[in-house]
Amino acid sequence: MTANSLTIRDNRNGKEVELPIIDGTMGPGVVDITNFYKEFGLFTLDPGFRSTASCNSKITFIDGDKGILLYRGYPIDQLAEQSSHLEVCYLLLNGELPNKKQFEEFSHTVTHHTMLHEQMAFLFRGYRRDAHPMAIMVGVVGALSAFYHDSLDLRNPRHREVSAFRLIAKMPTIAAFSYKYSVGQPFVYPCNRLGYSENLLHMLFSVPCDNYVVSPVLAKALDQVLILHADHEQNASTSTVRLAGSSQANPFAAASAGIGALWGPAHGGANEAVLKMLHEIGDEDHIGDYIKRAKDPHDPFRLMGFGHRVYKNYDPRARILRKAAYEVLGELGRGDDPLFRVALKLEKIALEDDYFVSKKLYPNVDFYSGLILSAMGIPTNMFTVIFSVARTVGWITQWKEMISEEGQAISRPRQLYTGEVHRDYVPIYQRK
Ligand code: SDX
């Protein structure tokens, strides 16, 4: 019997098997159950994967109890304060911070991939003007594989790298085009002399008949929002990208699947749901009613922007965004923004309420991000689109880690079958 193992005993027949425990560099170790079915003829069951590690990864580390988030070992608060989204993209993709030359080359490459094939403009026009921009993102990102099939040989590391550049570079353009289409304004092309977040604001808010000057404060705040949303280990959308990519589907199709998963209000769609909830609450006097509803097990209402599968402490990203919200609203002369006041009061009440304290429901990344994006003039239905722009680097980095893994195989979980046992077909004339 080795020290670093679990001995599992099958009490039906007394069979005992040692399963190895594998420790990582940080966080909980894992018990390797690769041979569990072969040894016991049983599957393990873990709906929602609360106790299941789906892979080993070197990219992002989260300690939910301590509220720690590291990208390639660097604390999120240091990156949010001192780095830029493009530099964080390099860090996540390559595992190290770039030197000056490396960053200049990376930045030049991404900047010169920001345009879309001109034919793609017609894709947007196939949607109703009132289509949710996330519906457009799912479609257009998946369609990238119809235009950029010269970099889809997944066995070729150079192709994997080019696809990563293309996705990171083109997501802001696709996001901005989906917004412009929804408001009936002409598409604004990317401008290569602008930084990544500046360019996104430029493409969102410039119009042909006016000279839109990007506010450095807003560009910095948006860049910080992108950094904070860039990756988050094996969350629902990233796991979707990994699973879709495990079938050797191209990275654009895998990213499109990730966008679909992110859209849900339990995941990346929460930032849009938070703003809707704050508008619905309206003012501080109504907060009590909503807290009551959130606590009622018979009421499906949940306090959007609260709770997290991993963080059982304050989400470190929410803490940074709360500070940024103060700064942006203050900069825009909206420090007394009524929604922000409701959010602060709601947070205070929830953090003192035993229901939320006992269930360790703290504000998460989505609680404040919407307030900042809204203050920038970004409409609510674009919040999750911005999240998808940010998370693209996480998705493609996790996809690259998965696809280049030794012995990479298709992800194909099993099930506990509880349906009908075998029965024979009955012709319709014999049925009652
Ligand atoms: C993101 O995974 C990631 O990393 C995601 C993300 C990322 O960067 O990729 O961090 C981004 O998705 C953040 C989460 C955004 N979602 C929301 O803000 C939606 C509101 N939150 C809930 O839907 C919920 O908290 C989840 C989905 C986030 C987490 O759900 P879990 O882990 O499955 O928790 P649970 O549903 O088991 O809840 C535990 C208990 C339950 O009560 P009991 O069954 O124990 O009685 O807490 C309650 C829940 O009813 N609860 C809430 C609540 N969240 C959980 N009650 C009221 N309001 C809430 N928000």
Image (spheres, grey):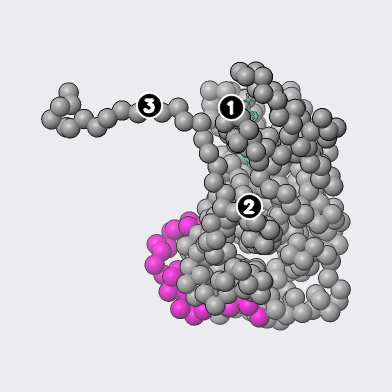
Mark 3 or mark 2: which comes first in sequence?
A: 2
Q: In this view, does 49 lie to the left or right of 94?
A: left
Identify the residue under disc 3: 421
- Mark 3 or 1: in front is 3
Q: Where is residue 43 in the image (x, y as percent from the top left)?
A: 58, 33
- Is residue 165 or residue 336 the one in the foreground? 165
Identify the residue under disc 2: 238
- Mark 2 or 1: in front is 2
Asked whether the residues under the numbered discs 3 and 1 touch, taking CB atoms below 8 Å apart as contact, a structural biologist would say no
In the displayed structure, 307 sits above or below 215; it is: above
Q: Residue at x 73, y 80 (%)?
A: 108
Q: Where is residue 115 in the image (x, y as percent from the top left)?
A: 58, 78
Pick the quarter of the image with the C terminus.
top left
Mark yes or no: residue 227 visible: yes
Q: Position of residue 18 (x, y in %)?
A: 74, 31
Identify the residue under disc 1: 293
User: Label 1's element?
Assistant: helix
Distance, label 2 to label 1, CA atoms, is: 31 Å
- Start-end of magenta stretch: 112-137
